[in-house]
């Protein structure tokens, strides 16, 4: 195809042909070509977007605030109603193995003002710094996700401590309880205070919300982090419903293309390593028994750098310490002395060992130290 360039271009003059922009340089006496973006930026800002990694709970059903997959949680408060969540293996339309399923086990047709229920995804501010919110060059974002549920109006809400953007989406009677794909456009926020550091932002897929949480203005930035819905929100807890979430993508779209990029399936290793920045199982470490003969200090590098310098720790099961001769049960764990690169614990053992003797923490599938920077 012949291109009809201007015969006497001025410096910086452009000519657009299809998705190519030609720019004239008087200094070079030539046109240079560059491609126009046809989609949002391709890197998905969601950690573990296909829920392939679940270090903590695998496919076990859970209740309360519960992580069925890394960086994905259920946040429920629908008493006297009941609800559970589970990761299940059911192939998605885009070919992923896993999805999350929320099941209402006891219905609540009349929500209290402070009730809420939703899938919650956690995003670190560092990962979305190019949204450039609160500046004159703030960018649009695109949220795309798979959703299955009963007919009704629900919300996808981007939320921080001080800002929220509730975007409604509707499941028609014909779409009810079938796999759908939802695409939400989130307008740039030129105001507010935004922390693009290690601060956690959240995305809610809101299934139910009482009046304390459903008063947001739809498709707009609200000057409060409280709303997770607008008044059009349906009560998904009113019947024994089932909801499923899968294949989540969150993309920055500075050129306002209005198109999400192609879905890219994440792999198990990458998803798990990225997730360990926020939570992992401390399964083993080495240290020395102190002069008290029953206390041992054990340390080990984190598998990846953690989001915060002092992650929270506890213990699960019955971890033990081996001193080269005897395995000793741990009776207490003092506060850890952590940083972003290393875990460090003080343990007290039920039986004494010789001071200065090496102590090796021995973990197992059900005995470990959860390290959390969520």
Image: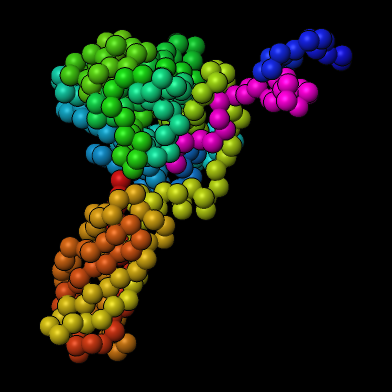
- Rendered position, 164 above or below 326: above
Q: Residue furthest right?
A: 2
Residue drawn at 34 percent across, 49 percent down: 307
Instruction: Examine the image and state in which quarter residue 127 appears.
Output: top left
- Rendered position, 149 above or below 8: below
Q: Quadrant of the C terminus?
A: top left
Q: Residue furthest left?
A: 292
Helix, strand or loop: magenta stretch:
loop
Give the magenta-colored segment's residue range. Answer: 22-47
Q: Is residue 353 left or right of residue 90?
A: left
Can you give x and y, in whole percent of width and height, for residue 97 in the image?
54, 41
Instruction: Examine the image and state in which quarter residue 68 appears.
Output: top left
Q: Is residue 19 magenta?
A: no
- Rendered position, 334 above or below 161: below
- Rendered position, 11 above or below 318: above
Residue drawn at 30 percent across, 74 percent down: 361
Residue drawn at 23 percent across, 21 percent down: 224
Q: Is residue 90 left or right of residue 186?
A: right
Can you give x and y, in whole percent of width and height, for residue 248 in the image?
47, 32
């Amino acid at each position: 195809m012949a291109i009809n360039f201007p015969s006497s271009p001025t410096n910086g003059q452009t000519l657009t042909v299809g998705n190519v922009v030609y720019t004239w340089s008087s200094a070079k006496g030539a046109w240079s070509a560059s491609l126009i973006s046809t989609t949002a930026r391709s890197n998905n800002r969601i950690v573990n977007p296909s829920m392939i990694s679940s270090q903590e709970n695998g496919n076990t059903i859970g209740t309360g605030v519960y992580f069925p997959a890394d960086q994905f949680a259920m946040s429920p408060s629908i008493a006297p109603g009941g609800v559970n969540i589970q990761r299940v293996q059911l192939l998605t339309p885009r070919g992923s193995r896993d999805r999350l399923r929320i099941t209402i086990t006891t219905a609540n047709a009349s929500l209290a003002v402070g009730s809420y229920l939703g899938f919650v995804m956690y995003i670190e501010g560092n990962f979305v710094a190019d949204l450039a919110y609160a500046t004159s060059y703030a960018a649009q974002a695109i949220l795309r996700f798979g959703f299955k549920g009963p007919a009704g109006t629900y919300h996808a809400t981007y939320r921080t401590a001080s800002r929220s953007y509730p975007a409604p989406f509707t499941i028609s009677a014909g779409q009810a309880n079938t796999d759908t794909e939802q695409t939400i456009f989130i307008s740039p926020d030129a105001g507010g205070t935004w922390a693009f550091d290690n601060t956690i932002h959240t995305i809610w897929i809101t299934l139910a919300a009482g009046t304390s949480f459903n008063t947001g203005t739809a498709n707009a930035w609200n000057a409060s982090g409280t709303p997770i819905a607008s008044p059009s929100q349906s009560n998904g807890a009113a019947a024994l419903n089932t909801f499923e979430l899968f294949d989540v993508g969150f993309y920055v779209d500075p050129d306002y293309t209005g198109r999400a990029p192609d879905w890219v399936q994440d792999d198990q290793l990458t998803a798990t390593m990225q997730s360990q920045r926020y939570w992992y199982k401390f399964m083993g470490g080495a240290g020395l028994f102190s002069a008290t003969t029953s206390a041992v200090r054990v340390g080990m590098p984190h598998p990846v750098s953690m989001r915060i310098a002092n992650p929270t720790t506890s213990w699960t099961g019955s971890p033990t310490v081996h001193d080269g001769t005897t395995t000793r049960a741990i009776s207490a764990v003092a506060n850890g002395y952590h940083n972003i690169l290393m875990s460090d614990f003080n343990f007290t053992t039920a039986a004494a060992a010789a001071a200065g003797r090496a102590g090796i923490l021995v973990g197992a599938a059900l005995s470990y130290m959860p390290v959390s920077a969520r």
